[in-house]
Amino acid sequence: MAKIIAVANQKGGVGKTTTAVNLAAVLAINNLRVLLVDADPQANATSGVGIQRGSFRRSLYHVIVLGDPLEPVILSTDIPNLKVVPANKDLAGAEVELVEMERRESKLRDALSGVEVDYDLIIIDCPPSLSLLTLNALSAAKTLLVPIQAEYYALEGVTELFDTLARVRRLHNPGLAIEGLLLTMFDERTKLSTAVANDLRDFYGQQVFRTVIPRNVRLAEAPSYGKPIILYDPHSKGSEAYIELSKEIHSYDTQSAWPRIGSVAGG
């Protein structure tokens, strides 16, 4: 059965979609069967793996709102082992339409249960809000990965997300665990980034990944070309950081039968 990771933070602009796309791509290139689920109506994870807006007829909306089967909605990408469940603007309407439905928080979990055996890893990119779409992702996930921008208000947002996590565990998904907290947009030249990193590690300890994602021009450019950083510039600092993150996640998963994660940039 697939390991399901929800990438979530209710704050926008923290590198959430960047992390979902690039972690999925690195793991897929390392021979894992990966499904990327775009649960954000902005659909940036969809375009970030090269799927053009308007090039597909059905999206996650049709699955969780209209009850369509998931398998026909899944699209291939330029990376053979990476598939994507696309999103588009229709998904914005799901928030309103799900409210009146029974088991509204379990729609995504039910849909994924039919394809779990086909993948080693499923990564869900959540919207930047604590919405019904995010609740669906947290109810379906086995672990939660939280990207945190290295900035002053970072800890405040994490506390709110952890309150939601406690409610989800209590009401919907008691087995949901923390995959880790990931520092993003880290600038080693500034005292602020270092101070935020130190505070986060002091407060959350081993729950914070050793890997940090740097501010990197190539990493910022890659989405405009519809490519994960591992395809756009495999030797960039951003690419190297996501390779290191994939190794770290793999090393934590002691029950995993995943192959050894190697540096794609180095072959």
Image: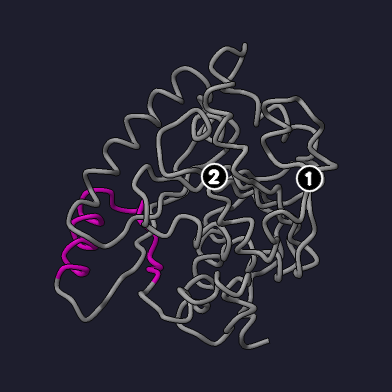
Label 2 Cα crowd, 10 Å radius (few <14 / some 14-19 / many 20+): many
Residue at (40, 54) in percent of width and height:
147
Residue at (55, 43) in percent of width and height:
41
- Seen as rendered, the residue at the extreme front is 54
120 with respect to 211 (left or right):
right
x and y percent of residue 185 in the render? 34, 68
x and y percent of residue 169 in the render? 46, 25
Residue at (42, 60) in percent of width and height:
15
The magenta segment is 192-213
Instruction: Identify residue for label 1.
Output: 57
Instruction: Identify residue for label 2.
Output: 40
- Seen as rendered, the residue at the extreme right is 72
Please, what is the dominant secondary structure of the magenta stretch?
Answer: helix
161 with respect to 49 (left or right):
left
Task: Identify which amino acid the numbered label 1 is placed on.
Answer: Arg
Residue 49, relative to residue 136: is it above or below? below
Q: Is residue 195 magenta?
A: yes
Using the image, tell me which numbered label, if any, was put on residue 15: none
Residue at (55, 69) in percent of width and height:
223
Q: CA distance from mark 1 to mark 2?
A: 17 Å
Q: Quadrant of residue 198?
A: bottom left
Which residue is nearer to you in this view: 180 or 125?
125
Task: Identify which amino acid the numbered label 2 is placed on.
Answer: Asp
x and y percent of residue 112 in the render? 72, 35
Q: Secondary structure at mark 2?
A: loop
Which residue is nearer to you in this view: 267 or 59?
59
Label 1 Cα crowd, 10 Å radius (few <14 / some 14-19 / many 20+): few
Dot 1 or dot 2: first in sequence order is 2
